[in-house]
Image (tube, helix red, strand yellow):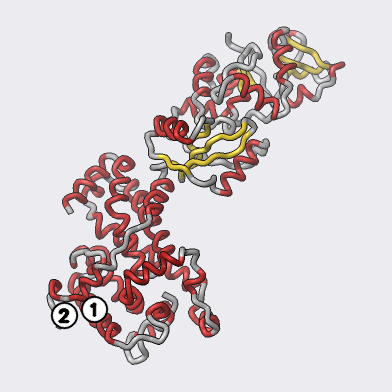
Amino acid sequence: MTSSPQADPLLDRLANLRATAPARVASDALVELGLADRYAATDSPLGRVFVAWNGRGVAWLGTAADSAEFEAAVSAHTGRPIARADALPTALARSIERRLAGDRRARIQLDLRGATSFEVAVWRKALEIPRGEVRPYGWIAAEIGRPKAVRAVGTALAHNPVPLVVPCHRVVRSDGTIGQYSLGGPGNKRRILTSEGLDTGRLEAEAAAGVRFVGSDTTHIVCHPTCRDARRVTERHRVAFPSLAAAAAAGYRPCRHCRPVSLVA
Amino acid sequence: MDSDTSLAARLARDLDGAFPDLVEAHVDHLFTIALRLLGDRRDAEEVAQDALVAAHRAIAGYESERIVDLRLRPWLASITVNLARNKRRRFADRHPAQSLEPLTASGFDPRDDAVVDPSTVAVERESAGELGSLLLQLPVSLRTPIVLRHVAGLSVAETAAALGRPEGTIKAQVSRGLDRLRDLLERPRSPRGAGDAHLRPADPPDTPRGVAFAATEVLR
């Protein structure tokens, strides 16, 4: 009863019902799978920054003179295509905003493919440093069980693909000076730390005077100078130490919150 | 087919590297199937995207021999058909068929509800014409094999593989569906034209299968 396919006009008409998918179907699928990235600009303590993300998480955060420069930087790092979006997804924008405001409960998924397990360990540890505080590179090295890898910690932090979100700016040199910063140099690092409530002038002045640790003569507990416990100590009871050994010799025990360590030179 | 065979081999070697090529080669295909099964562009976009994502996740869990042996066209078609069916079910759950009647009686057009550029809809209606709407009036069991076989252009064997039905069943369903479609084409148009055809029950009351499908077909 049905005529042959070649002769049946209905079959031709059915074949003409083929449709072309809008371009966003393919690109949305690739982004969701983490095979392509989207990016948009957002505000930060350093002014406008670009954020790149995909279905696996935030892949990159950076400053750039313009879109082209940012796209080139991310693509060179990831090897994936990247396209600009109008804005960050609402939930992500809110999480980043809360994070930058110091809310550590705001969860942000990160896409850290390509990173070594050492780098991830360093970045994860940096996430534990509270807003308004800093730790030396050697502290991270000790905390992740690689006390001699201080220089490698510095390199890993310099390669942090998501500065501000992973607060590598809260890691300073063991001599107490501010140190390098991947997102535009030491000036920016000082700016963010100040925006987080840290008195960088005092930190650097004390460091220059040889202060590495601070204790309280009432509790006999010794801390990193920016530890929240150390900052609660009144001037009258504040005791400065050049080393943990000196603090130990004076009968001080290390703070359980900031866990000060003897720094490997 | 040859290009799909080499694509499957490349997927087995480097899934992430080759997957964008799968997307490019098949996205229109999957969108077409979803669009002609569901009749709504936005739903079809979602289903096509979800099907691509599901395909990647599935392949990621397969042994490489299984990936090399994948017949991509029917395999991807079957993923799309399943997702379209789920979407239709969820839609039917959220919107019981009866609840639309008082609304449509007062002049409500469910198409207004979709956030779609009206000009796109107009173009879509024009180019698909009445046939796309009539297709939506077929019961899903006949519509699906017709869409795969004659819109998407799968072979009978591929359609059978995609739907997990014997080839003989596919041939019979396609032929029955085409007959039904011709009946619908010859029937006089409703006063409002093809645009509201999808609001009518799938099957006219005088066909025996009508009752079984009416509940899910009213809205689509």
Up-down: is B204 above or below B65? Answer: below
- Neighbourhood count class around disc 1 (C-alpha, 10 Å): few under 14, some 14–19, many 20 upward: many
Image quadrant assignment for residue A213: top right
The tag on residue B178 is 1
Which x, y percent locates residue B207?
32, 89
Residue B142 percent location from the top left of the image: 29, 76
Q: Please tell me which residue is depicted at 41% across the width and 64% down the height of the picture.
A: B120
Q: Is residue A54 above or below residue B211?
A: above
Q: Nearer the viewer, residue B103 or A130?
A: B103
Specify the subunit that label 2 lies on. A
Same-chain status of marks 1 and 2: no
Q: Do the residues labelled 1 and 2 touch (CB within 8 Å)?
A: yes
Is residue B192 or residue B1 the one in the foreground?
A: B192
> Amino acid type of disc 2?
Thr
| Residue found 39% across the figure and 55% down from its top | B49
Q: Is mark 1 on a helix, strand or loop?
A: helix
In the picture, the quarter occupied by the C terminus of chain A is top right
Q: Where is residue A236 in the image (x, y as percent from the top left)?
A: 87, 16
Whether residue A248 is visible, yes or no, is no
Q: What is the tally of numbered marks visible in this picture? A: 2
Label 2 residue SS? loop
Does B83 sit left or right of A11 as displayed?
right
Q: Which of B36 and A244 is in front in this view?
A: B36
Q: Disc 2 designates what residue?
A: A2
For label 2, count other residues whose C-alpha is less than 10 Å away and answer few (under 14), some (14-19) or many (20+).
few
Q: From this view, report whether residue A257 is shown above or below residue B58.
A: above
What residue sits 14% from the left and 83% below the top?
Answer: A1
